[in-house]
């Protein structure tokens, strides 16, 4: 990891104030001195590329992420490298804020708006999984909303950089709440982990609460059902079960039941396995 102070100028970009900080680095408001475009420039000052070959591996990962395009995937428009070993990611300036800002401030997200976000994030996850890529870091800070309430998913390379040991292994508190239990034993992100995290996101947006009473995946006991339509409860419980073989195998399968619940119809197997009479713990024991 570089100890250098971020430069006042990074490539052709003039850095302005810091506007955010994440697991990979610090985000600055910046202006392209050639085009005058205002962008968000994330300097990866928390990515450790000091080991031989790791800088190239990090840049390769980020450039691959930048090559993937989808309406609801927050784009990486440019990858920069500085002479002193820092890497920068240029992204569009988000028109609004992350979902997390609304949740932290205790603002209620209308059910229709929450459903729209869940559907849009599901669509980009389906796209990624078709490319044999798992996101692995779904959480409210990585879901960005524009002024029209449309969502984009950011920080695609983060979990893969963590897997290579290039950023700290310890996930944030919020990330631990969103992690599938098996992630404790399996470092590599998989589509089934994204299904679990999407279920947590859906619950969080619809109720304003995190579903679990403990951030540690193996210490979770029960999921509160308060504030949820009864028919939706087994759908979310199936998405968030620790039993991988019982969990929805694809995002599409989860969304079929999630959207079907609005019409009063879900998969009979979901209803049988996760009926209202069952305690979540009966299915969530390892």
Image (cartoon, rainbow, N blue to C red):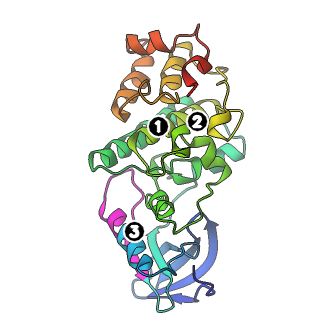
In the picture, the disc for residue 118 is 1
- Circle 3/circle 1 CB separation < 8 Å: no
Query: Could you say which is closer to the camera, residue 205 or residue 157?
Result: 157
Between discs 3 and 2, the one toward the N terminus: 3
Q: Residue at x 63, y 30 (%)?
A: 207
- Per the image, label 1 sits on a secondary structure element best described as helix
Which quadrant is home to the N terminus? Answer: bottom right
> Of the residues tagged 3 and 2, which is closer to the observer?
3
Report x, y in % for residue 253.
35, 27
Q: Residue at x 48, y 57 (%)?
A: 159
Q: Residues within 10 Å of mark 2 (few under 14, many from 20)?
A: many
Left/right placement of residue 12 relative to residue 131 reads right
Query: Could you say which is closer to the camera, residue 114 or residue 215?
Result: 215
In the picture, the disc for residue 205 is 2
- Per the image, label 3 sits on a secondary structure element best described as helix
117 is within the stretch colored magenta: no
Left/right placement of residue 207 relative to residue 148 reads right
- Circle 2/circle 1 CB separation < 8 Å: yes
The range drawn in magenta is 62-80
């Amino acid at each position: 990891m570089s100890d250098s102070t971020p430069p006042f100028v990074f490539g052709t970009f003039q850095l302005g104030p810091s506007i955010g900080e994440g697991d990979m680095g610090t985000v600055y408001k910046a202006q392209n001195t050639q085009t005058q475009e205002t962008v968000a420039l994330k300097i990866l000052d928390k990515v450790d590329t000091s080991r031989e070959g790791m800088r190239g591996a990090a840049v390769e990962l980020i450039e691959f992420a930048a090559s993937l395009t989808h309406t609801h995937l927050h784009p990486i428009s440019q990858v920069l490298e500085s002479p002193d070993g820092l890497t920068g990611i240029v992204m569009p300036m988000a028109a609004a804020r992350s979902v997390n800002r609304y949740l932290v401030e205790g603002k209620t997200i209308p059910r229709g708006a929450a459903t729209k976000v869940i559907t849009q994030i599901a669509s980009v996850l389906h796209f990624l999984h078709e490319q044999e890529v798992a996101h692995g870091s779904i959480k409210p800070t990585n879901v960005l909303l524009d002024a029209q309430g449309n969502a984009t998913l950011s920080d695609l390379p983060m979990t893969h950089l963590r897997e290579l040991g290039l950023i700290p292994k310890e996930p944030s508190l919020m990330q631990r709440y969103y992690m599938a239990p098996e992630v404790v034993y399996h470092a590599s992100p998989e589509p089934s982990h994204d299904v679990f995290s999407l279920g947590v996101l859906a619950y969080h947006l619809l109720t304003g609460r995190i579903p679990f009473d403990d951030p540690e995946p193996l210490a979770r006991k029960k999921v509160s059902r308060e504030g949820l339509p009864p028919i939706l409860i087994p759908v979310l419980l199936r998405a968030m079960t620790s039993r991988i073989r019982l969990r929805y195998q694809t995002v599409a399968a989860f969304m079929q039941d999630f959207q079907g619940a609005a019409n009063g119809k879900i998969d009979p197997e979901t209803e049988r396995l996760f009926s209202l009479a069952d305690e979540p713990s009966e299915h969530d024991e390892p």
